[in-house]
């Protein structure tokens, strides 16, 4: 046994000496009690088994070191070494000596002591306690007898003291409100400590588009409280974006289209999001949308949101959509979203010459939706696996409303009330193929199911954010599958040139088509913002690839 008198400079910490005299009554010793509970970037430890050096263990903190030792003990017990345990631990700074004994291999008479069943029981019991505020829980043999090398008895759990979260320590000063970070990472002061929750902090931080973890977390325990040490960096994720494009109209002339978008990601430094977008996608057609999300309302796990969209198609129809919903995380990276959506379609023109065989009508639609998602496109650069996905389903009722300016015969072939269903899915990933080259692909699809599907409620595709090489919102589709593929060559961290190929498969009534678009572009990051340019050409049944049909887009993004 080592001590200070022998000049090693270590502090000897004995372990429950009364229990060492009766090793059958304990299996797992909580290392948190015996380690110096300081913040350590990394813990180096040497393991001695039955007096001989067995190996070394390297852990980021005491939580992970405890898991390693407990796993080793459970493996030994699983093999029949029921008397194995920890004799003592000597700790100083970031170096630890762990002395253990393996004991004699025995046979078990009690079924719960045997093989994988015992291993499963021990692991399950420990996880149950360590994730409910008892990280020092230990499992003990109770009422144990030994006869002729055969052991029998029962297991019991000693919970140890209850540990709750203390306030976190931040290595750098943050502008974001601490309460938002606590809710985001599930480390709320006063709540029971969870070992699993602590280990998942590096994944939970990816829920935020403007917070980044600079290095692994650390932890310390004192006075029945756990304090998490975080090195977090705040990114400039809010943005103002402007895009200008050139496209041809039916008379062969070229007209300018464009879009403006203001996206505030950390409103009032509390994680709130406010997004405003306006787009002119044709000569007399515009689209307006407003989105607001309030995270962790009343310190709960629920984040409500509101969305409003208004679309005007020339002088023909108007579409207004309003939705409210709630967001919540069901896994570190998986968010569930429940919403109620109300859509109203209004005809602006009642000319029979314009509406005849158009499939247009006034309508209102009320649907309920469920969505699961694993992130957002801008989070791809933050992840090692660099992939995100989403899936949503919606269902409800739709009613066609009669327009008094139209004759009753206009509605003779239209079903007034019907059920409405919508399914959408997407997956996106970025794969680094070399140091400065990356392959990016975004695949998305959707389908609308309704007995009386109107043209003014179909999906709208085409343009810079969907199928490049075509006019904005040029395609009215019922079902579609869209692939957007890019090969990017980076010459700076956020500056790159790229070539792209987009391919769309869609159907609408009896019409199907497979238009595609291809082209090239670049994104140039400067201290003032990011400039972008894209030149695209597209081909479909109604459009051939030609110089006169090419689309040019100029964009600028300012981040703050």
Image (spheres, grey):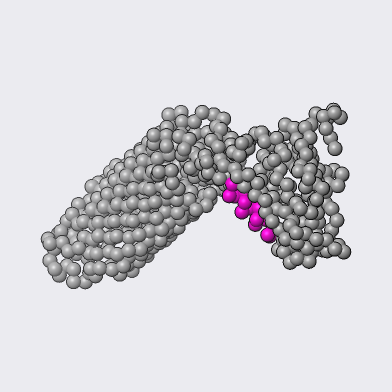
Q: Is residue 130 magenta?
A: yes
Residue at the spot x=12%, y=60% of the render? 405
**Quadrant in which the C terminus appears:** top left
Image x and y of residue 557, in percent: 40, 36
Q: Is residue 28 left or right of residue 311?
A: right
Quarter where residue 97 is shown: top right
Q: Is residue 332 magenta?
A: no
Q: Is residue 281 visible?
A: no
> Eyeballing the image, is 457 above or below 409?
above
> Eyeballing the image, is 547 above or below 446?
above
Image x and y of residue 496, in percent: 50, 38
Residue at the spot x=71%, y=43% of the render? 31
Residue at the spot x=39%, y=36% of the render? 267
Quarter where residue 87 is shown: top right
**Quadrant in which the N terminus appears:** top right
Residue at the spot x=73%, y=57% of the render? 142
Prevailing secondary structure of the magenta residues: helix
Question: Disc count in the image?
Answer: 0
**Which one is in front, 495 or 131?**
131
Image x and y of residue 380, in percent: 52, 45
Quarter where residue 108 is shown: bottom right
The span picked out in magenta is 120-133
Image x and y of residue 340, in percent: 33, 56
Q: Is residue 335 visible?
A: yes
> Eyeballing the image, is 144 above or below 548?
below
Q: Is residue 429 left or right of residue 456?
A: right
Q: Is residue 35 left or right of residue 470?
A: right
């Amino acid at each position: 046994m080592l001590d200070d008198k022998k000049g090693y400079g270590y502090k000897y910490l004995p372990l429950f000496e009364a229990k060492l005299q009766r090793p059958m009554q304990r299996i797992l010793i909580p290392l948190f009690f015996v380690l110096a509970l300081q913040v350590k970037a990394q813990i180096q430890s040497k393991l001695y088994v039955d007096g001989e050096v067995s190996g070394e263990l390297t852990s980021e903190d005491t939580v992970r070191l405890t898991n390693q030792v407990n796993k080793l003990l459970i493996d030994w017990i699983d093999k029949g070494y029921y008397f194995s345990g920890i004799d003592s631990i000597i700790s100083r700074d970031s170096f630890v000596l762990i002395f253990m004994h393996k004991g004699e291999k025995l046979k078990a008479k009690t079924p719960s002591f045997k093989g994988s069943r015992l291993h499963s029981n021990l692991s399950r019991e420990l996880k149950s306690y360590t994730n409910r505020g008892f990280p020092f829980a230990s499992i003990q043999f109770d009422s144990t007898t030994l006869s002729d090398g055969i052991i029998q008895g029962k297991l019991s759990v000693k919970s140890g003291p209850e540990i709750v979260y203390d306030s976190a320590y931040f290595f750098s000063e943050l502008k974001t409100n601490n309460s938002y970070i606590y809710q985001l990472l599930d480390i709320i002061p006063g709540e029971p400590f969870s070992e699993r929750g602590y280990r998942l902090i590096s994944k939970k931080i990816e829920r935020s588009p403007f917070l980044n973890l600079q290095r692994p977390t650390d932890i310390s325990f004192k006075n029945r409280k756990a304090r998490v040490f975080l090195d977090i960096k705040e990114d400039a994720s809010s943005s103002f974006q402007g895009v200008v494009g050139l496209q041809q109209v039916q008379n062969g002339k070229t007209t300018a289209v464009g879009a403006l978008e203001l996206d505030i990601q950390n409103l009032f430094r509390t994680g709130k999001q406010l997004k405003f977008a306006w787009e002119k996608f044709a000569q007399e057609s515009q689209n307006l949308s407003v989105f607001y999300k309030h995270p962790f309302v009343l310190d709960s796990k629920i984040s409500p949101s509101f969305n409003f969209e208004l679309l005007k198609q020339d002088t023909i129809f108007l579409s207004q959509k309003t939705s409210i919903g709630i967001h919540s995380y069901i896994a570190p990276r998986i968010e569930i979203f429940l919403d109620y959506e109300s859509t109203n379609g209004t005809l602006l023109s009642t000319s029979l010459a314009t509406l005849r065989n158009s499939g247009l009508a006034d309508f209102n639609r009320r649907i309920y939706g469920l969505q699961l998602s694993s992130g957002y496109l801008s989070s791809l650069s933050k992840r090692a696996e660099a992939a995100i996905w989403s899936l949503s389903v919606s269902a409800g009722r739709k009613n066609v409303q009669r327009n008094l300016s139209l004759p009753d015969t206009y509605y003779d072939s239209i079903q007034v009330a019907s059920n409405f269903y919508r399914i959408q899915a997407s997956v996106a990933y970025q794969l680094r193929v070399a140091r400065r080259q990356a392959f990016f692909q975004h695949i998305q699809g959707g389908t609308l199911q309704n007995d009386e599907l109107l043209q003014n409620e179909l999906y709208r595709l085409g343009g810079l954010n969907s199928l490049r090489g075509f006019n904005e919102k040029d395609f009215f589709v019922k079902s579609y599958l869209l692939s957007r593929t890019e090969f990017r060559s980076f010459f700076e961290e956020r500056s790159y040139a790229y070539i792209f190929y987009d391919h769309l498969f869609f159907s609408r009534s009896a019409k199907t088509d497979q238009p595609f678009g291809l082209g090239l572009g670049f994104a140039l990051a400067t201290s003032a913002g990011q400039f972008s340019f894209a030149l695209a050409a597209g081909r479909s049944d109604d459009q051939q690839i030609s110089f006169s049909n090419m689309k040019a887009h100029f964009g600028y993004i300012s981040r703050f």
